[in-house]
Amino acid sequence: MHSIADQLPPEIARQIHPDRRKNEAAYWAAREQLLDQYQGQWIGFADGRVIASGSSPVTVFAEAEASGLHPFFICVGMEEEPRRIRRAVFPYVCA
């Protein structure tokens, strides 16, 4: 199994926390057991367990990141499908 981080440019891949890589490897080891319950859902996976799950990638990502455990974040069963998640903040102008 190759890490998803290995597909990044080296200067960016070096910034990935080692715990996130560990959590990714643990996810792949547990993936088959997660398919029945979490297929098609976004999850945050850390310390050998799902720490956040749901249909909204933004909500799950925020909840998982708040744990401070450097979780691996993925949509179960759809790992090979490209996904883009962007967060943009725009100022509001009151007139």
Image (tube, rainbow, N blue to C red):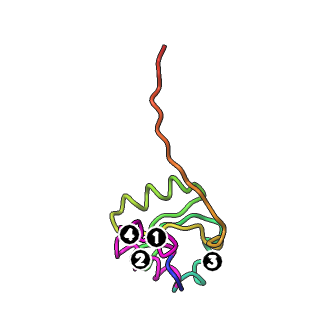
The percent coordinates of residue 60 (x first, y second) are 50, 58
Q: Which residue is mark 2?
A: 21
Q: Earlier in the sequence, mark 3 or mark 4?
A: 4
Badge 1: how crowded within 10 Å, few (<14), some, or many (20+)? many
Give, as a three-letter code, the residue at label 2: Arg
Q: Earlier in the sequence, mark 4 or mark 2?
A: 4
Q: CA distance from mark 1 to mark 3?
A: 16 Å
Secondary structure type for disc 4: loop
Q: Earlier in the sequence, mark 1 or mark 2?
A: 2
Give, as a three-letter code, the residue at label 4: Ile
Query: Which image quadrant is residue 19 in?
Result: bottom left
Query: Which image quadrant is residue 91 in?
Result: top left
Q: Is residue 7 rendered to the left or right of residue 83?
A: left
Q: Which residue is mark 1?
A: 72
Badge 2: how crowded within 10 Å, few (<14), some, or many (20+)? some
Secondary structure type for disc 2: helix
The residue positioned 61% from the left and 73% from the top of the image is 37
Secondary structure type for disc 1: strand
The percent coordinates of residue 92 (x first, y second) are 47, 26
- Which residues, given as a range, are shown in magenta? 4-28
Q: Is residue 89 rendered to the left or right of residue 69?
A: right
Residue sticking out furthest to the top: 95
The percent coordinates of residue 1 (x first, y second) are 54, 86
Q: Looking at the magenta stretch, what is its main secondary structure?
A: helix
- Mark linked to residue 16: 4
- Mark linked to residue 35: 3
Give, as a three-letter code, the residue at label 1: Phe
Contact (CB < 8 A) between labels 4 and 2? yes
Residue sitting nearer the eye, 77 or 36: 77
Q: CA distance from mark 2 to mark 3?
A: 20 Å
The residue positioned 49% from the left and 69% from the top of the image is 8
Q: Is the residue 44 above or below the residue 34 in the image?
A: above
